[in-house]
Amino acid sequence: MNRFSCLALALSVASFAVTAGSVAAPAPNPGQPQPPLHLLRAALGKNHLGKEVRAVTRALGEYPTLRPNRVVFSAPADVFGGPAWQDDGRLDDAYYLTWKTRGIEMAFRFGELAAIFLYNEKADGFDRYPGELPGGLTFGDDPTAIERKLGQPDQWDELSDIRKVGGKLQDELWMTYDDSNGLGIWIILRRVQREPFTIHSIHLSKPKKE
Amino acid sequence: MSRTFQLHLEELSDRVVPSVVPAEYSAGVTIRSELDAEFDAFIAAGGTFDAMHQTAGSCDPSCGTGSTIVIDGVSIAVSATVLTYASTNAPNADDSDEPLTVPQLHYLTRYLEILAAGKPLSSAQLAEMNGWLHRLQKHGFEGSGEQQLKDLNAMLEALNKIVSKPAPLVGAALDLYTKMVDAIISGVSKNIKEAEYAKFKQTMDAKPANMSLKDYYEENKGGFAAGLVDLHYIRYQAELLKDKLSKLPIKK
């Protein structure tokens, strides 16, 4: 069977599913509506089928949207410090699993969880992630509060007028922590019309290696 | 057999889990994932799967479909990926028909640097990056001030850093970098006259081998219109980079 027939097979199964009618996703585990932070931390760098990642998806309790994208990570190995392809010749397949109503997105590379994105209300169409954030952060924190909780960031980038939203110019601020208690944390804040910065999203990854 | 597919075999359960197929699925996309072959091998070996669902792309950040298998009721495994890469979708439509601004040029480079550091961008950031590339190509960039030139040069430097390494590029990544260089050339070319550029190129092509491009440029730029010569130089460098990209070994 070639890959085209594989697709046809997949579609025939998909058609069956349509005929059979849509079935709601399983309900979240009672008492555990969001994956605790320690589960997110444990899942970083793990295989998408491994028990750590499955513990997170099980806690989320809904089917995610799959967004395939190979070029997210593809790059020469010696530039980016990691293989751009596997020894067996397999290319760098990257994809996202997105739960918009849960405020969370995961980026996978070679089937391994490379980053987790936690979103604030209405950020890129997401609902606010209601679970625990690292370092005691809350989505209401401003840059001063973030520094009080996590310390001085390893990198601070601010750019004015980066985009126009609803006719208003928007500024963006990045606060990057290479290793905050075993987590790489990249906080993106935005503001319009020079109002105070608010957190847009928090990106979690493995800590940066020196 | 790859590790991923080995896990497929080990962890596929025998329970039937119906799944949902988005209505917007459409055919005519390109199959590119090597996981397809793994799946073919699985079927050829007599393997069966219980349920699969397709997720259709909305061009955010890429168009395509993914095939997934449900395990344990909620976990999913990617078994095949179908995609075409798009560069037309930006999350913020406010300025979609306008030239790229100075901060956006700067950010485009920052995004590139993040990818170059092996870190992922979110799907929205990737969509925005592609939207900016599209705008740069279609509408150019605002003005021609020193800051824009600096930012375009920074983009070129980031791209040069990547392609100057000896490792072969993955085809899809090469497409992205080529698109960036094309966008720079298009953006710059909107503000310069072809005849003028042809003269500039002829001068630069005569550079002695033992002289750096930058030194040669500094020595000769006085012979060209002061307001445009920097743009000529950026386009010239971008064309050299494009030529370099076209000669790189590609791993398919």
Image (cartoon, coloured by chain):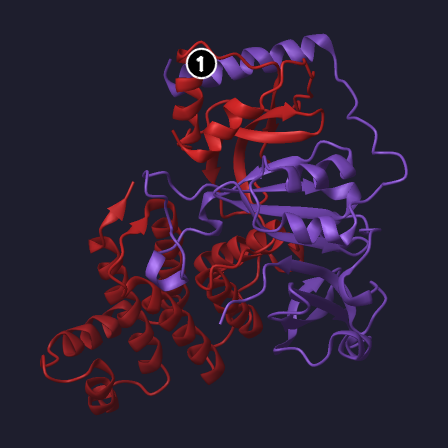
Chain colours: A purple, B red
Q: Residue placed farthest to the right in the image?
A: A31
Total marks shown come to: 1
Write the residue at 64% across / 37% down.
Answer: A51
x and y percentages locating residue A97 in the rendered image = 63, 40
Residue located beneath label 1 in the image: B43
Q: Is residue B155 visible?
A: yes
**B68 shown above or below B62:** above
- Identified at 51% across, 68% down, the residue is B110
A47 to B66, vertically: above or below: below
Nearer-the-camera pick, B251 or A85: A85
The image position of residue A161, as x and y in percent, is 66, 73
Q: Position of residue B16 (x, y in %)?
A: 67, 13
x, y percent for residue B12:
58, 21
- Which amino acid is tagged 1? Ile
What chain does badge 1 belong to? Answer: B
Query: Is residue B186 among the parts visible in the rendering?
Result: no
Q: For this view, does A177 lie left or right of residue A25?
A: left
- Tell me the quadrant of the picture where the N terminus of chain A can be found: top left
Q: Nearer the viewer, residue A73 or A137?
A: A137
SS of the residue under disc 1:
helix
Residue B31 in which image quadrant? top left
Could you classify mark 1 by the number of other residues whose Cα lies within 10 Å: few (under 14), some (14-19), or many (20 or more)?
some
